[in-house]
Image (cartoon, rainbow, N blue to C red):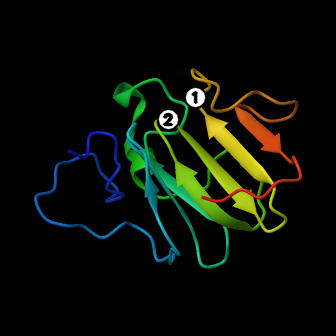
C-alpha cells in the first residue's frame, strides 16, 4: 500500500516490486513510522521526509507532493546527526546534541514552542541515544 506516498515513488499507486525513491540525494539511514511518514538524514546532514506529513491527522491528507522527499517545513535548516520517526512525529539530534521533535502532540511527543509549529527544542545537558 502506498496510499500515503510512503514509498517515495512520486505517486500514490500500489507497487508490487521495490521502487527507487524519487531523489538523487544519498541517505545515511532511514526511519519509518507507523503513521505513514518516512524520514532520513542525508549525506550532507540535512533531513528529508515523505509520506504523510508528520503531524497530519490521516491518510486523506496525503498528496502526490508528499510522495517525494522534501525537508520538513517546520524544521530549522542545520546539520543533523540522528533521526527517529514514530507514529505521527519525529525527533532529530544535531551536532551539538540538541534534540528537536515535531508532529503530533496527542501523547506529549512534541510541544509547541515560540516560533515553531509543533517543534520542541530540548537542551537538557544529557546525551540522547537514538
Residue 22 location in percent, x, y?
38, 66
Residue at the spot 16% in from the left edge and 49% down from the top edge: 14
Residue annotated with mark 1: 104
Decide: few, some or many residues near mark 1? Use Cα within 10 Å; few <14, some 14-19, many ≥20: many
Decide: few, some or many residues near mark 2? Use Cα within 10 Å; few <14, some 14-19, many ≥20: many
- Tag 2 secondary structure: loop
The answer to whether residue 49 is visible is: yes
Residue annotated with mark 2: 88
Residue 65 as seen in the image, left or right of residue 96:
left
Distance Cα–Cα, label 1 vs label 2: 5 Å
Residue 115 as seen in the image, left or right of residue 73:
right
Front in this rendered view, residue 85 or 12: 85
Residue at the spot 87% in from the left edge and 46% down from the top edge: 124
Classify the position of the N terminus by image quarter: top left
- Tag 1 secondary structure: loop
In this rendering, the answer to whether 27 lies above or below 73 is: below
In this rendering, the answer to whether 60 lies above or below 26 is: above
In this rendering, the answer to whether 95 lies above or below 106 is: below
Classify the position of the C terminus by image quarter: bottom right
Residue at the spot 40% in from the left edge and 26% down from the top edge: 58
Dividing the picture into quadrants, the one containing residue 117 is top right
Which residue is the extreme one toward the top?
106
Dividing the picture into quadrants, the one containing residue 121 is top right
Task: Specify which label sits upstream in the sequence, 1 or 2.
Answer: 2
Pointer 1 and pointer 2: residues touching (CB < 8 Å)? yes
The answer to whether residue 74 is visible is: no
Amino acid at each position: 500500500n502506498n496510499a500515503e506516498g510512503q514509498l517515495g515513488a512520486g505517486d500514490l499507486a500500489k507497487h508490487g516490486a521495490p521502487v527507487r525513491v524519487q531523489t538523487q540525494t544519498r541517505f545515511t539511514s532511514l526511519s519509518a513510522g507507523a503513521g505513514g511518514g518516512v524520514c532520513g538524514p542525508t549525506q550532507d546532514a540535512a533531513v528529508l521526509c515523505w509520506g504523510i506529513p508528520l503531524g497530519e491527522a490521516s491518510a486523506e491528507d496525503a498528496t502526490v507532493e508528499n510522495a517525494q522527499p522534501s525537508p520538513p517545513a517546520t524544521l530549522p535548516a542545520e546539520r543533523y546527526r540522528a533521526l527517529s520517526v514514530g507514529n505521527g512525529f519525529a525527533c532529530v539530534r544535531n551536532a551539538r546534541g540538541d534534540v528537536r521533535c515535531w508532529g503530533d502532540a496527542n501523547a506529549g511527543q512534541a510541544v509547541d514552542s515560540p516560533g515553531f509549529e509543533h517543534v520542541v527544542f530540548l537542551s537538557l545537558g544529557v546525551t540522547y541515544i537514538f
